[in-house]
Image (cartoon, rainbow, N blue to C red):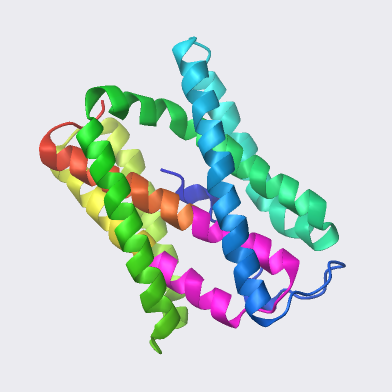
Amino acid sequence: MNPEYRGYSDHPELIGRETVAPVAGRSAVATVFGLLAFSFVFSAIGGVVGLSLAASGVFGLPFFIVLAVVQIGFIFALQPVARCSAPLGLLFLYGFTFLSGMSLGPLIGYYLVAAPAILGQALLLTAIITGGLTVFAWTTDISLARFQTWLFVGLLALIGGSILAIFVRATWLEILLGGGGAVLFSLFLINDVQKIKRMEGTFANAVMMAAMVYLDIVNLFLSLLRLLSALTGNSRD
C-alpha cells in the first residue's frame, strides 16, 4: 500500500503562480487524463523492470526501502518542480510512476503465479469502480470537499492498521483493512476528480492532479487485492 505518498503542501485548486503557461477549460481536463494515461504506461514499464529485478534476486528489503524513500521524495518535490518547469514536472511525474511500478512488480509477479484469478478480479473491479466513480464525481452536485479532514483521519487510521497487521496476522484484520481501504480510496478518487472540475487550469495543477488520481487508483487496486486475498484465504505472508 502506498497511502503515505499522498502529501502536498497546497490545495491544487489554489496553485496558480508558476512560470508554466496556464491551460484553459476542457484542455486542462484533457491534460490531466492524458498525463494519467501515460503515468500508467510508465508504471507498467517499471513493473516489468521490478519483476525482472525480483527474479534476479536484486529486489531485497534494503532495495525496497530505498525505492520507497526515493518515491516519497519525488512526490513531495513534484509540485514545486512542476511550478518552475513543465519538462522537469513531467520527468518527476513519470519518474515517480515508474518507480511505483517497480515496487509493485514483485507483488504482481507473486499473484501471477500463486493466484492469477484474484489478480484478474482485482484489476477488473478496479477498472469498473474507477470508471463508475469518475462518472459519478463528474456529474453529481454532491461535494466531498468538506469531508477532507475525515478522509485524512481515515488515511492515518489505515496506515496505523497496516503497521499493526505486520505484527498481528489475522484474516479479520486483512478483511477490515482491505475493505476499509477500498472505501477510503474510492472516496479520495471522487474528491480528486471533483477537484479537477474546479481547479485552476495550470500545467502544474494538471501534473499534481494526475499524480493524486494515479495514487487513488493504485491504492484502490491494492486494497481490493488485499480484500479478495483475505476472503479467499490467499493472503500473502
Image quadrant assignment for residue 82: bottom right
Quarter of the image with the N terminus is top left
- Measuring from the top left, give residue 167's x and y in whole percent: 28, 31
How many dots with numbers?
0
Can I make out residue 59 in this image?
no
In the displayed structure, 169 sits above or below 37; it is: above
Magenta-drawn stretch contains 196: yes
Direction from residue 122 to residue 68 in the image, left or right: right
Q: Residue furthest bottom?
A: 141
Residue 23 visible within the image: yes
Instruction: Identify the image quadrant of residue 41.
Output: top right
Which residue is found at the position 61% from the left and 65% from the top? 32
Image location (x, y in percent) of residue 138: 44, 79
**Residue 84: percent from the left, percent from the top?**
85, 59
**Image quadrant containing the C terminus:** top left
Q: Which range of residues does the magenta coloring cover?
A: 187-214
Side of 182 where 8 appears, left or right: right
Horizontal side of 165 relative to 97 (left or right) equals: left
| Rendering coords of residue 80 (x, y %) | 77, 58
Instruction: Say which residue appears at 59% left-offset and 35% top-offset.
Output: 99
Q: Nearer the viewer, residue 135 or 57?
A: 135
Q: Is residue 173 above or below residue 143?
A: above
In front of the other: 1 or 163? 1
Residue drawn at point x = 75 percent, y = 53 percent: 89
- Magenta highlight on residue 121: no
What is the chief secondary structure element of the magenta stretch? helix
Relative horizontal placement of residue 118, taking residue 106 as reference (left or right): left
